[in-house]
Amino acid sequence: MTLGIAPSSASLSTSTSAASANRLLEPAEWASAGIPLLRSPREVVSGLHARHRPKPATAIVAVLDPDERLLASASFTRRQAQADGWMFRNSLLSQLRRVIPHDLRRRTPVRTAVLLYCREGDGRWTEEDGAWMWGLRDACTLHGLRCGAYITLTRDGWQVLGEGRGGRRPHADSEPEPFALSEAPPPLPRTGGAASEVLRRAAAR
């Protein structure tokens, strides 16, 4: 009787082992994941850059409505540790929970989360980017959001990875531009009586 022996883990390639251990997505996996395209990527990037003024090692997670208006955003500095998608997922999920309620009760997500990461180097994909991609996708699933674009911001400019779109400004060292990402209007307070009527008339003007 002949017995088959499964290949040991040592026979796996270094890159495959690293991807599994660090939970990262390769560019081909990201491109085939059906990530919705931004209609105005430069406007989104410029708006987030003007609002948060990121420096290298700064991540900005933003939630957009179906018209690409900003609903909420948060920035934080990446800790000096090994790039790991699980850790990045936890950081992103913590920020999302802090700034916006989840959409887990919806059958289909209507809001989209995008991630802008300011870092050293050029705009080409790195394993760190792959870990951010994995983290963003998983955080969106756990918060009931659509997973949107992953954008790098370096001294060379900005780049929407997986789409091939980018630009030279803004970049990691540039000053914020004079316009910012448009925001969705805040909902009217839920009050009754005369106060509610006054607010409705003021909003209609």
Image (spheres, helix red, strand yellow):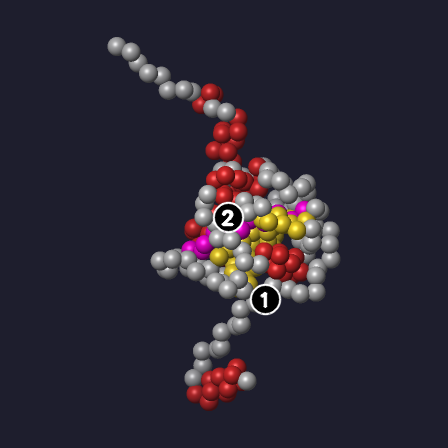
Residue extending furthest toward the top: 1
Res 74 seen here: no
Q: Secondary structure at mark 1?
A: loop
Q: Which residue is mark 2?
A: 136
Could you tell whether 97 is left or right of 120 in the image? Answer: left
The tally of labels here is 2
Instruction: Please provide percent x and percent y for residue 155.
Output: 71, 47
Q: State the predominant SS element of the stretch in magenta.
A: strand
- The amino acid type, in three-letter code, at marker 1 is Ser
Does residue 21 sit above or below 85 in this rendering?
above
Could you tell whether 134 is left or right of 1 in the image? Answer: right
Does residue 62 sit above or below 119 in this rendering?
below
Density class for disc 2 (Cα within 10 Å; few <14, some 14-19, many ≥20) is many
| 58 part of magenta stretch | no
Q: Residue at x 45, y 81 (%)?
A: 191
The residue stretch that appears in magenta: 144-154
Q: Residue at x 42, y 55 (%)?
A: 144
Specify which label sits upstream in the sequence, 1 or 2: 2
Q: Residue at x 30, y 14 (%)?
A: 3
Instruction: Please provide percent x and percent y for residue 108.
Output: 38, 57
Residue extending furthest toward the left: 1
Q: Which residue is mark 1?
A: 182
